[in-house]
Image (cartoon, rainbow, N blue to C red):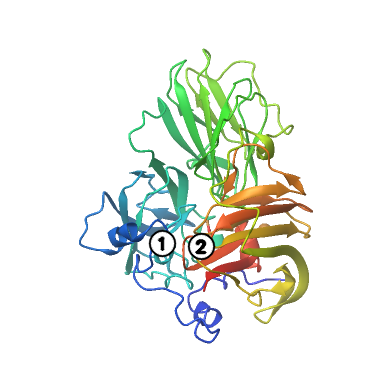
Amino acid sequence: LVLPLGWMWQASLLPDRYDMAAMGYADWGGGPAGAHDHHHGTEVADLVADPSLPADVEETFTVATDGDRFTVNGTTPGPVLRATEGDLVEVTLVNDDVAEGATLHWHGIDVPNAADGVAGVTQDAVMPGEEYVYRFVAEDPGSYWYHSHQVSHEQVQKGLFGAVVIEPRGSGGSDVDEVVLMHQYGGGGTVNGQPGTTTVVAEPGDAVRLRLVNTDNGLATAWLPGTDFRVLAVDGRDLNGPTDVTDVGVEVPAGGRVDLGFTVPADGARLDLSGGASVVVGPGDPDGVRSPGPGEVLDLLDYGEPEAPPFDVSRPDRRFDYVIDRRPGFLDGVPGLWWTVNGGLYPDVPMFMVTEGDVVVFEIVNDSPDSHPMHLHGHHALVLSRDGVAATGSPWWTDSLEVGVGESYEIALLADNPGLWMDHCHNLPHAAEGLVAHLMYD
Ligand code: C2O
Ligand code: CU
């Protein structure tokens, strides 16, 4: 069976699927970036919306084809976008020659809806010769990334992405702070586009922060054999009271980010990644220390110190089931074996409707024969439990959550960012095969 995977996010097909007026949603959004109130109050919204206010960080990202890859300003990955907490960021996307059009989605940054960059949902794809301006305030320090959200399963895999780092305001930070983008361009693993071993210059005793970003479709695992380390942050949110661990793997779901912190040992450290690439940090490749390979992995459910959540998760305003399964059927008239949400074949999946201010609990259940890195746009959700076992560690905020075969997760979020938001699998071929739903504000 040959499945046409290219159709899903073609701008030409989407207007029908998202005919909001026909679905009874007259006022769902669109329009210029910043047209919506941002969740942290009108001050921020005004700041984003007023085009006369100069941005603190201003970039032009030109996307183009290069052989069978896509580039941003001539390279893949594209440039690292760096901002400081509170900065107004303005990025102009210019499409040189990406024939199917492109967008920029700010994965993990809870931007205003009109800056979310989802072709066919929050904007039209930007066609060759066109441009689009994204404006948002870099409110939450952490590690993020950007990527095209048009025919994503092709454009992201072929390189249309880059990292975003939001530094905390006025903090000393680490001696060494590096982004580690993990990607496979249809071959072996690369780090920041380089196969094999990448070297990070550091001295013994330096405090290092490695920002692992999984831009690929599969679950990645990282090891730091023999080196004590801690997980500082997950999905752009610091963990509370993380403790040192040794010789344990750290999993990074597709789309997810994990920041590791450690002190460089006398003979250096080496990070081994499941895709086959490595990062040597410090004086050299530490001798005789090798990755333990597949083995114990760190469980975030009970890692770090608990802290009271910022909203009352015991009395949700809405509870939703999100049951993932697979069955034969027709998706847009095409026969195949498709992923389903609550039994429905996309787009016959009702939107999850919320009201601003709601505390929303989702129970995500994976009854399908594959695991799914589930990504919610525009929000961070707090993990409450897995398979009925309550989370007891640091608050674990996520926007990209690996839901394994047979697993169930209960997560909670505050509906504080009005708009229409995708909630989909970030194993992007799965999304093209139907694993997409939406969260929508009434
Ligand atoms: Cu990183 Cu909807 O995607
Ligand atoms: Cu999936």
Q: Earlier in the sequence, mark 2 or mark 1?
A: 1
- Asked whether the viewer can see residue 218, the reply is no
Looking at the rendered structure, the secondary structure element under dot 2 is loop
In the displayed orientation, state which residue is furthest to the top: 266
Within 8 Å: ligand 1 and the Cβ of disc 1?
A: no
367 or 339, which is in the foreground?
367
Q: Which residue sits at x=49%, y=52%?
A: 108
Q: Position of residue 29 (x, y in %)?
A: 43, 74
Residue 276 in the image: state x and y as whole percent.
62, 36
Give the left or right position of residue 301, taking residue 75 as reference. right
Q: Amino acid at mark 1?
A: Pro
Where residue 149 appears, as percent x and y from the top left, is 49, 63
Report how far apart the C-alphas of labels 2 and 1 lie in the structure. 16 Å
The amino acid type of the residue labelled 2 equals: Gly
Tell me the crowding category of disc 2: few under 14, some 14 to 19, or many 20 or more residues within 10 angstroms, Cα based: some
What percent of the width, then of the height, locates residue 387?
77, 49
Q: In the rendered image, which residue does mark 1 sit on?
A: 112
Left or right of residue 102, residue 324 in this image: right
Looking at the image, residue 163 sits to the left or right of residue 427; the answer is: left
Label 1: how many residues lie within 10 Å, few (<14), some (14-19) or many (20+)?
Answer: many
User: Which residue is rendered at x = 73% and y = 63% of the image?
Assistant: 323
Q: Considering depth in this image, is 411 or 291 the residue closer to the camera?
A: 411
User: In the image, is residue 396 above or below residue 409?
Assistant: above
Side of 409 where 235 appears, left or right:
left
Tally of numbered tags: 2
Tag on residue 357?
Answer: 2
> Which quarter of the image is occupied by the N terminus?
bottom right
Q: Would residue 390 be visible to someone looking at this image?
A: yes
Question: Which quadrant of the figure has residue 102?
Answer: bottom left
Q: Residues at badges 2 and 1 in contact (C-beta under 8 Å)?
A: no
Say which mark, if any, is on residue 260: none
State whether residue 195 is above or below residue 124.
Answer: above
